[in-house]
């Protein structure tokens, strides 16, 4: 049945009772889903709910054990990703995989080059078609630009253009906004809305509920591999969606406990790194959470890296409990009681192919060393203790950390540093890319740590997180600290006004 012949009452792509198991693990249990043309449809669920497995089945990477896939109402089988692509299904992943040394145009038509007379590649025709695809998306991107150096947002646009060049009718977007700035998210949403108007069915996966409610018309929720509900967005609230995802009432996404701030534990005075940030001064007391807010590129993460000694500063000073730190020395920062949970947990916070217990021990090997050797028993005991305290979900402590969900990986990074009993904990984007239930657990943990006497410096791009967890909000703009806002006075408007340079302290 061709697209122009199908009934308006027929979804472009539908899954009926799809199940998939990997050994003893039931990844999907009787899941059904309908994707309609000219509509964005959210797929919601906690990490481990089965979303990734469902996407792989639609993309032809995995085959279901039971159930069926229907394209325009007709049952189909995808034996490979090529089968799914030929059927008009494209997946845009969070981190695109382009050929960096080829141009944008060459990436779009890789393996399907346009050929002219005598079978020669017609580069002019390909460039013209690429420009037409970007015009169709309503964006400006140079077809001749090399892929190397493109932002993640622009790489995603190239992937979307590649999908359109294949006449894709179903576009699956898996956490596409996780690494984007606010302006890039707005541009991507404009592209998605243009695709909807052109008849595409869009499956949108995101942990950010505000994005789901802004962009999508329907939402299907999975929990523990099973189908929970499929709702019209207009008929539910964010709280309803959270309840479907976690299977319980979420007492509070931001369970902030009121504490009594103590003495200053971290003092940053006129810290400067030429060309990156200038004259940054602030302090953090024991028992409080201080948020460092601002737009992407404002210099927040760079300040954190300098405090921890990853990067050297050019002027200023950092003191921890009255002890001045030398520039560019993570060892000295760790010895003084500073811990850093980095933004990129996979690349900078964990060794993905090492075990859970080994990763937790990495920041404190002296505690599990017995003579010249590491004691496996001590390492396991230390890891088991923190796994219980952090409510870690795992099979065996000897499993590689790469098999854990994003939220549980974040808990391992936290466990690695908390095992050192730090006095200052710096957390950079602590809940990026993790589900709403685990977010609440991480927030609970941060609040408990502050009440227990640790000074927490939290960097976050999510305003609700900043407003919900911080005792004070420090706002950066273009490498300078421009505002300090007490919790009682912090609003989205006041923080964003300072972050965009419209007001200053």
Image: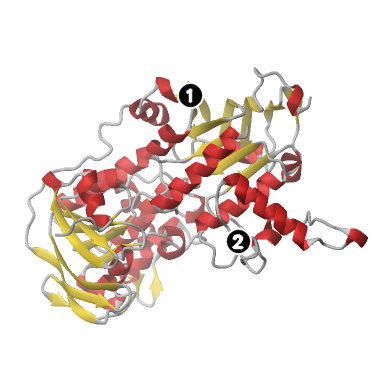
Q: How is the image coloured?
A: secondary structure
Which of the image's four quarters has the C terminus?
Answer: bottom left
Which mark lies nearer to you, 1 or 2? 2
**Element at label 2:** loop
Report whether 480 appears left or right of 222: left
**Label placed on residue 228:** 1
Q: Earlier in the sequence, mark 1 or mark 2?
A: 2
The 10 Å Cα crowd at callout 1, few under 14, some 14 to 19, many 20 or more, is some
The correct choice, above or below, for 69 with respect to 126 in the image is: above
Find the distance from the CA under tag 1 to the CA under tag 2.
44 Å
Q: Nearer the viewer, residue 469 or 437?
A: 469
Identify which residue is drawn at 68% across, 40% down. Answer: 168
Q: Is residue 309 visible?
A: yes
Q: Which residue is mark 2?
A: 142
Residue 30 % position (x, y): 59, 25
Q: How many marks?
A: 2
Name which quarter of the figure residue 499 lies in. Answer: bottom left
Residue 385 % position (x, y): 31, 52
Q: Is residue 175 visible?
A: no
Q: Nearer the viewer, residue 28 or 88?
A: 88
Identify which residue is drawn at 61% across, 58% down. Answer: 97
Report whether 48 appears left or right of 441: right
Residue 222 % position (x, y): 49, 30
Residue 38 % position (x, y): 59, 30
Q: Nearer the viewer, residue 13 or 310?
A: 13
**Element at label 1:** strand
């Amino acid at each position: 049945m061709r697209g122009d012949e199908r009934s308006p009452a027929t979804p472009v792509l539908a899954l009926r009772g799809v199940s998939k198991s990997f050994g003893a693990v039931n990844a999907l249990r009787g899941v059904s889903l309908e994707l309609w043309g000219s509509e964005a449809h959210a797929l919601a669920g906690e990490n481990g709910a089965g979303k990734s497995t469902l996407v792989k089945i639609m993309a032809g990477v995995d085959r279901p054990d039971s159930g069926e896939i229907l394209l325009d109402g007709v049952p189909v089988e995808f034996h490979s990703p090529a089968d799914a692509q030929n059927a008009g299904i494209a997946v845009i992943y969070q981190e695109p995989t382009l050929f960096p040394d080829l141009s944008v145009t060459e990436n779009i038509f890789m393996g399907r080059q346009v050929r002219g007379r005598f079978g020669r590649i017609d580069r002019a025709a390909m460039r013209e078609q690429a420009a037409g695809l970007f015009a169709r998306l309503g964006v400006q991107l140079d077809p001749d630009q090399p892929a190397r150096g493109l932002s993640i947002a622009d790489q995603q646009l190239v992937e979307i253009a590649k999908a359109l060049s294949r006449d894709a009718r179903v576009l699956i977007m898996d956490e596409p906004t996780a690494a984007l700035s606010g302006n890039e998210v707005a541009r991507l949403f404009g592209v998605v809305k243009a695709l909807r108007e052109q008849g595409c069915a869009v499956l949108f996966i995101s942990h950010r509920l505000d994005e789901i409610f802004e962009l999508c018309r329907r939402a299907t929720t999975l929990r523990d591999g099973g189908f929970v509900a499929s709702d019209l967005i207009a008929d539910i609230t964010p709280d309803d969606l959270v309840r479907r995802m976690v299977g319980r009432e979420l007492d509070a996404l931001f369970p902030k406990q009121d504490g009594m701030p103590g003495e200053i534990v971290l003092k940053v005075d006129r810290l400067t790194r030429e060309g990156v940030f200038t004259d940054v001064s602030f302090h953090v007391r024991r028992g409080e959470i201080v948020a460092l807010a601002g737009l992407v590129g404002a210099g927040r993460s760079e300040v954190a890296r300098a405090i921890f000694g990853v990067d050297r500063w050019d002027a200023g000073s950092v003191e921890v409990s009255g002890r001045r730190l030398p520039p560019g020395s993570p060892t000295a920062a760790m010895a003084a009681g500073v811990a850093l949970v980095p933004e990129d947990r996979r690349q900078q916070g964990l060794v993905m192919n090492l075990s859970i217990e080994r990763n937790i021990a990495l920041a404190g090997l002296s505690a599990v060393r017995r003579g010249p050797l590491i004691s496996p028993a001590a390492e396991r005991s230390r890891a088991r203790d923190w796994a219980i305290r952090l409510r870690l979900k795992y099979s065996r402590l000897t499993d590689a950390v790469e098999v854990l969900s994003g939220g549980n990986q974040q808990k391992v990074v936290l466990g690695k540093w908390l095992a050192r009993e730090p006095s200052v904990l710096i957390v950079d984007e602590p809940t990026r890319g993790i589900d709403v239930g685990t977010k609440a657990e991480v927030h609970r943990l941060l609040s408990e740590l502050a009440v227990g006497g640790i000074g927490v410096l939290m960097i976050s791009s999510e305003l609700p997180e900043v407003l919900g967890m911080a005792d004070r909000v420090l706002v950066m703009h273009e490498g300078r600290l421009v505002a300090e806002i007490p919790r009682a006075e912090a609003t989205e408007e006041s923080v964003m006004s300072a972050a965009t340079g419209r007001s200053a302290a």
